[in-house]
Image: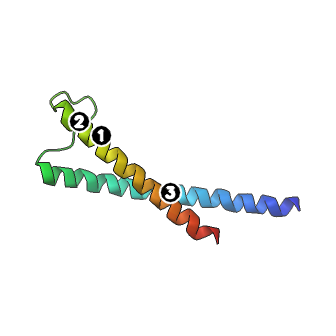
């Protein structure tokens, strides 16, 4: 019996690693798309940490929007692949 439960945990661990890699790739692509969209819409590059030339409102807006978007994308991708591979 112990061997069966051990095999299941190995499968879950390998599934977690695969999903993590997929989330990493999707997050990278989403950041690129967000950055290009911001640049196209505003005509300026998004603020970077420590950028004192940008107004505070623009920095806070970019931070809030990008954090929300990336968090939502990561959650959806994890949920999609985890639910898909359970059954």
Q: Residues within 10 Å of mark 2 (few under 14, many from 20)?
A: some
Q: CA distance from mark 2 to mark 3?
A: 29 Å
Q: Could you tell me if the residues under marks 3 and 1 are in contact, i.e. CB atoms within 8 Å?
A: no
Name which residue lies at 52% across and 55% down.
Answer: 20
Secondary structure beneath dot 1 equals helix
Which numbered disc, 3 or 1, marks the residue that appears first in the sequence? 3
Q: Which mark is residue 21?
A: 3
State the residue position of label 2: 59
Q: Could you tell me if the residues under marks 2 and 1 are in contact, i.e. CB atoms within 8 Å?
A: yes
Task: Indicate the quadrant containing the C terminus: top left, top right, bottom left or bottom right.
Answer: bottom right
The image shows residue 70 at horizontal and vertical percentages of 38, 50
Task: Indicate the quadrant containing the N terminus: top left, top right, bottom left or bottom right.
Answer: bottom right
Left or right placement of residue 6 versus residue 11 in this view: right
Name which residue lies at 52% across and 61% down.
Answer: 79
**As displayed, is residue 76 above or below residue 53?**
below
State the residue position of label 1: 63
The image shows residue 54 at horizontal and vertical percentages of 16, 33
Name which residue lies at 16% across and 31% down.
Answer: 55
Q: CA distance from mark 3 to mark 1?
A: 24 Å
Pick out the residue farthest to the bottom.
Answer: 87
The image shows residue 60 at horizontal and vertical percentages of 26, 36
Q: CA distance from mark 2 to mark 1?
A: 6 Å
Secondary structure beneath dot 2 equals helix
> Can the viewer see residue 22 in this picture?
no
> Can the viewer see residue 53 in this picture?
yes
């Amino acid at each position: 019996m112990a061997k069966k439960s051990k095999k299941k945990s190995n499968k879950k661990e390998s599934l977690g690693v695969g999903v993590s890699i997929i989330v990493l790739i999707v997050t990278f692509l989403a950041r690129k798309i967000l950055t290009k969209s911001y640049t196209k819409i505003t005509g300026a590059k998004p603020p970077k940490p420590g950028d004192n030339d940008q107004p505070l409102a623009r920095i806070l807006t970019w931070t809030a929007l990008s954090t929300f978007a990336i968090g939502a994308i990561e959650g959806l991708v994890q949920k999609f692949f985890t639910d898909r591979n359970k059954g």
